[in-house]
Image (spheres, grey):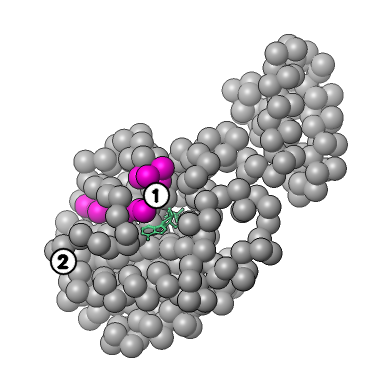
Amino acid sequence: MKIKDALKKAVEKLKKAGIETPVLDAQILLSYILKIPRWKLIIKENEELSQEIVEKFFKLVEKRANRTPIAYITGEKEFYGLPFKVEEGVLIPRPETEILVEEVLKRIKNRKNPTGIEVGVGSGCISISLLKNKPDLRMIATDISEKAVKTAKENAKIHGVDERLSIIKTDKLKSIKGKYDFIVSNPPYIPQYEYESLQPEVKKEPKEALIAKDEGLEFYKDIINEGYKLLKENGFFAFEVGYNQAEKVEKLLQKKGLKTEKVKDLQGIYRVVIGEKK
Ligand SMILES: C[S@@+](CC[C@H](N)C(=O)[O-])C[C@H]1O[C@@H](n2cnc3c(N)ncnc32)[C@H](O)[C@@H]1O
């Protein structure tokens, strides 16, 4: 089978399964199997594929048609210009979370040897991006999931920041002591009643990375309460929030006397809330 025919057949299968970007997804899967960049598929479109490759390719197409996210199939996702390993059981980094990284970096760029904590490290995308862009930063990151801790440790090693990042399997901030410049988190924030309406792909991701009690506010409340004493006098919280949670999280921070700021994403939705001690 020629490359162009394999792609055509795959696109039809993906379309039928209701995949929104069938052409792109088919190309990504084939370029992943052939280990060539996507643009080369066009130049090579008349090349014959071996039977073995065709079989491998359609196995992956089948997986995608069953709504497995592309990143779980290829085992990788780009975030803040860096490749991160991901596997089933670990949340796939989202582009909107890059805003959170940006906002933390802005606030620590002039601090000397700053220290920070991340709650819910997942793949490690937030902590590792921060550490790569601030060479004198040191961090502690926590996660309740064994798989997340293992994956984040692997990613930290790959990106050469493992000596400045200590990753602990614990509940939120339990067993952490000391004073830090910031606490960052993209915690689970989806209320149970919204979970059912999520895309099938999202439902292939770990529930414990997504769902939170108390209208989705459970983690913000606990992190603010437990984390307040862990912040230095000029320390700050930086949170990613759900589409309708910014004001509620802002109020929780203000109750503690913190100065708040909200930041919008590219769609104009408040995505990040900062609370500074000052
Ligand atoms: C929305 S994901 C964020 C992952 C990653 N930081 C990112 O932005 O892609 C939330 C993370 O919190 C973790 N988590 C859930 N409950 C937790 C708890 N009680 N303590 C620490 N981490 C928890 C999940 O395992 C998951 O990795």
Disc 1 target residue: 145
Q: How many marks?
A: 2
Quadrant location of ligand 1?
Answer: bottom left
- Rendered position, 155 above or below 170: above
Q: Earlier in the sequence, mark 1 or mark 2?
A: 1
Quadrant of the rendering where the C terminus is positioned = bottom left
Q: Position of residue 29 (x, y in %)?
A: 67, 31
Cβ of mark 1 under 8 Å from ligand 1: the answer is: yes
Is the residue marked by circle 1 packed among few (<14), some (14-19), or many (20+) residues within 10 Å? many
Q: Secondary structure at mark 2?
A: loop
Q: Secondary structure at mark 1?
A: loop
- Rendered position, 56 above or below 270: above
Q: Magenta residues?
A: 138-149
Q: Residue at x 57, y 40 (%)?
A: 71
Q: Residue at x 33, y 70 (%)?
A: 223
Disc 2 target residue: 179
Identify the amino acid type marked 2: Lys
